[in-house]
Amino acid sequence: MFDNLSERLSQSLKKITGKAKLSDDNVQDTLREVRMALLEADVALPVVKDFVESVRQRALGQEVSASLSPGQAFIKIVQAELEQLMGAANESLNLAAKPPAVILMAGLQGAGKTTSVAKLARHLQERDKKKVMVASADVYRPAAIRQLETLAGEVGAEFFPSDESQKPVAIAEAALAEAKLKFADVLILDTAGRLAIDEEMMAEIAELHRTIQPVETLFVVDAMTGQDAANTARAFNEALPLTGVVLTKVDADTRGGAALSVRAITGKPIKFLGVGEKTEALDPFHPDRLASRILGMGDVLSLIEEAEQKIDRQKAEKLVKKVKKGKRFDLEDFRDQLQQLNNMGGITGMLDKLPGMGGMAQAAQQNLDMKQFARMEAMINSMTPDERRRPEIIQGSRKRRITAGSGTQVQDLNRLLKQHKQMAKMMKKMKGGGMQKMMRGLGGAMGGGGMPPGGMPPGGMPPFK
């Protein structure tokens, strides 16, 4: 996420970090590079000018000169100004209304509106324990209504049926009446998008807004369109009282222009980030955490929250008890660890949130075969319960049966068995001596910092190709 911007800013700021004193000259040199980094990231020019000027004034003021470490103080200023630029704090949805609270989703075609409706429904159900109904007033795009029905089934939200012959306003009114009858806490209404902003589209969505009086009107926009995303959001905001923005496809955006421009240009907060295709890939937007990630400082808080939500506590506790008792770490346990890691977004998703690991996340993304998890799981699923409990019996004909059943090669299975064996050794070291022994073992296994030959360190990282 925003890899290019992060790399450029990190390089620019590295030069000033160790300075014993900040002068007008070295601050100006650094800010010139920061300006170029932001412009290359497609941040809007007025936003860049204001940002650089704010940093310059603070950097040459008392705040830095009184500091024991001026270089570090300068980076803190840049981080604080980035946070301020993107909104200072997380702004959650305002659902304090008589149920059902209506959320209207607006945006251009192809921005990911319908998928975002399903993601938001899932988010509200799982995190806020709300009963959610979704409805589609998109009567123009073929299969739009059917797509939402499928996604609603996937996330377990109530779906209000509509069809292309109805008027959007009639659909909205009927959906609102149904949501009241079914005691839904929230009604999310999907609307039609266009390839470009036009009068007909704006008139229709403005009429929908007047009819259902939503508590939240969210503009869904593709982050990869850069500062154009901010300009489109501004055009919508002039026709519609937007309450916030949902930035989609952020995981594929290496620049970051939209995230840094939207708030300044529209005056509206970014409320959510779409960070993947799956329905759980929607994150509340925290400006402070994103600023930290952009500057290569990671986002440990989000990683902890993600772990709390996605890790199966019962399985984790069961494994801890098993390891403490010195029982064998078998292939069933190994598969559970792979699944937990996959739920957390894989290796790259985790590395990206750890301080100083952004570059490593990029390298992992390029070098890892991302289908490795699926192949490993398929091989374990092709084994008998006895083989999973006692991997040492997997020889000859058993290997051929397992690889034929999972569509893999014998060398893939050999690699899996070797990785499991190394991880089992690490787990064994945890009995009695606990974590210190395990860490000593880890240091040895990794040969002073490298990957085990052809294998994977404890924690389940697949081998690099």
Image (cartoon, rainbow, N blue to C red):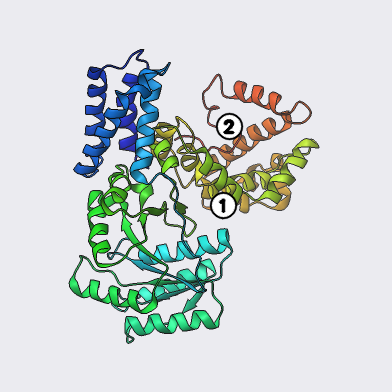
On residue 154, which mark appears?
none
At horizontal 33% and vertical 25% (from top left) the residue drawn is 13
- Looking at the rendering, in which quadrant would you find the C terminus? top left
The image shows residue 425, relative to residue 262, as above or below, that is: above
Residue 379 in percent (x, y) is at 58, 49
Q: Is residue 376 visible?
A: no
Q: Quadrant of residue 126?
A: bottom right
Residue at the extreme bottom: 165
At horizontal 48% and vertical 76% (from top left) the residue drawn is 159
Q: Amino acid at mark 2?
A: Pro
On residue 457, which mark appears?
2
Mark 1 or mark 2: name the one nearer the start of the chain. Answer: 1
Residue 276 in percent (x, y) is at 42, 53
- Closer-to-camera residue (153/117): 117
242 with respect to 414 (left or right) = left
Q: Is residue 182 visible?
A: yes
Q: Amino acid at mark 1?
A: Ala
Q: Nearer the viewer, mark 1 or mark 2?
A: 2
Q: Secondary structure at mark 2?
A: loop
The image shows residue 190, relative to residue 225, as above or below, that is: below
- Closer-to-camera residue (358/368): 358
- Closer-to-camera residue (358/117): 117
- Looking at the rendering, in which quadrant would you find the N terminus? top left
Q: Secondary structure at mark 1?
A: helix
Residue 283 in percent (x, y) is at 46, 52
Q: Residues within 10 Å of mark 2 (few under 14, many from 20)?
A: many
**Spatial distance from mark 1 to mark 2, Cα to Cα?**
21 Å
Residue under circle 1?
378
Q: Quadrant of residue 441?
A: top right
